[in-house]
């Protein structure tokens, strides 16, 4: 259910550009752009993530068939989705109660990976499994990774432009004579920090919007929302993973605990449970 931030997406784009000449043998996914180099570059992104670090083991047959049946139900066979179990490294990084998709950032109907924490997946009810898988597939169907990357870069550039074109002239921060004064250096640092903080808040808000959209679009394909309610309740009960060995993750957990949902990339679980209880399915 996590998604990658704009820096990760940008790294993938750059990686795909460097590896664009590689002839990666992947099953065809009915691409809408008939450029072989671009197709291979997109598949290279999948290879970049489809490695031992995040998980390379196939799921148990009954889980594999269950997910493939949902893919068929949603008429998403042409997305060429490879299903993998999350490795111990991925679970430590993203949490045991998790699943995520790694699609092409260039388009909707290309090669993609769906990573599942299988030991946790096995503990879920059939309805919760359906809700989880459909939520992740909605990220693919609505091209959320590409939208998130574009929004993140656009908002970052907007805040940089705000500082450069408005804040700097107001305080004359572009004047090298003034910049030698400690008070103006402090103002410059504070202005940069405030712009950075604004970007982080806006970016997190957009991430929460995307997650909400994936929830709603998935619920529209179901006859009931009990699966979502059970899923979010399960995540809430198991949300606190063992003390992480990743310093950045521990730091982000402390920020989230202190500031609440403002910096969160996902809606609050109680909020998600509430709007799913009130959602009227039309499937």
Image: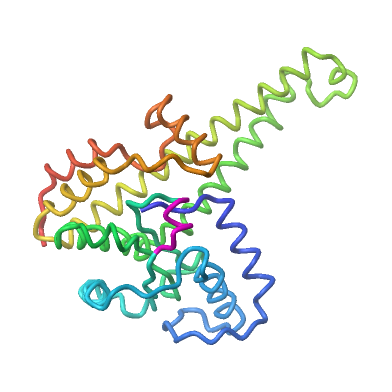
**Residue at the location (51% across, 79% down)?**
33
Q: Image quarter for residue 23?
A: bottom right
Give the residue at the far top of this rendering.
183
Q: How is the image coloured?
A: rainbow
Judge by depth and name the residue closer to the eye, 174 or 118.
118
- In the displayed structure, 165 sits above or below 94; it is above
Residue 130, horizontal then vertical, whole percent: 20, 63
Give left or right: position of 100 versus 276.
right
Residue range corresponding to the magenta coloring: 86-93
- In the displayed structure, 73 sits above or below 146; it is below
Give the residue at the far right of this rendering.
177
**Residue at the location (34% across, 60% down)?**
117
Judge by depth and name the residue closer to the eye, 222 or 33.
222
Give left or right: position of 81 versus 41.
left
Asked if residue 186 lies in the magenta stretch, the reply is no
Quadrant assignment for the C terminus = bottom left
Q: Image quarter for residue 100?
A: bottom left
Residue 175, horizontal then vertical, whole percent: 85, 23
- In the displayed structure, 168 sits above or below 73; it is above
**Residue at the location (40% across, 52% down)?**
2
Give left or right: position of 245 versus 174.
left
Task: State the count of labels.
Answer: 0
Residue 42, horizontal then vertical, whole percent: 54, 73
**Residue at the location (25% across, 72% down)?**
63
- In the displayed structure, 188 sits above or below 12; it is above
Judge by depth and name the residue closer to the eye, 92 or 130.
92
Residue 79, horizontal then vertical, whole percent: 38, 76
The prevailing secondary structure element of the residues shown in magenta is helix
Asked if residue 91 lies in the magenta stretch, the reply is yes
């Amino acid at each position: 259910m996590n998604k990658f931030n704009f820096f990760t997406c940008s790294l993938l784009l750059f990686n795909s550009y460097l590896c664009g000449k590689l002839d990666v043998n992947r099953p065809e996914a009915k691409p809408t752009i008939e450029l072989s180099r671009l197709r291979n570059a997109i598949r290279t992104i999948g290879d970049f993530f489809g490695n031992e670090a995040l998980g390379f083991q196939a799921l148990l047959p009954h889980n594999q068939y269950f997910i493939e049946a949902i893919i068929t139900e949603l008429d998403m066979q042409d997305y060429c989705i490879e299903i993998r179990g999350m490795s111990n490294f991925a679970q430590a990084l993203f949490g045991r109660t998790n699943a995520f998709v790694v699609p092409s950032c260039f388009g909707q109907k290309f090669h993609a990976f769906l990573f599942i924490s299988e030991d946790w997946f096995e503990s879920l009810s059939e309805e919760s499994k359906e809700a989880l898988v459909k939520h992740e597939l909605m990220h693919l169907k609505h091209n959320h990774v590409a939208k998130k990357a574009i929004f993140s870069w656009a908002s970052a550039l907007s805040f940089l432009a705000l500082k450069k074109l408005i804040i700097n002239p107001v305080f004359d921060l572009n004047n090298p004579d003034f910049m030698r004064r400690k008070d103006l250096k402090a103002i410059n640092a504070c202005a940069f920090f405030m712009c950075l903080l604004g970007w982080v808040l806006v970016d997190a808000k957009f991430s929460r919007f995307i997650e909400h959209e994936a929830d709603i679009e998935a619920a529209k394909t179901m006859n009931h929302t009990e699966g979502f309610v059970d899923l979010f309740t399960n995540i809430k009960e198991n949300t606190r993973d063992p003390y992480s060995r990743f310093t950045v993750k521990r730091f982000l957990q402390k920020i989230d605990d202190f500031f609440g949902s403002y910096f969160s990339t996902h809606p609050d679980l109680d909020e998600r449970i509430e709007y799913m209880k009130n959602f009227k399915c039309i499937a």
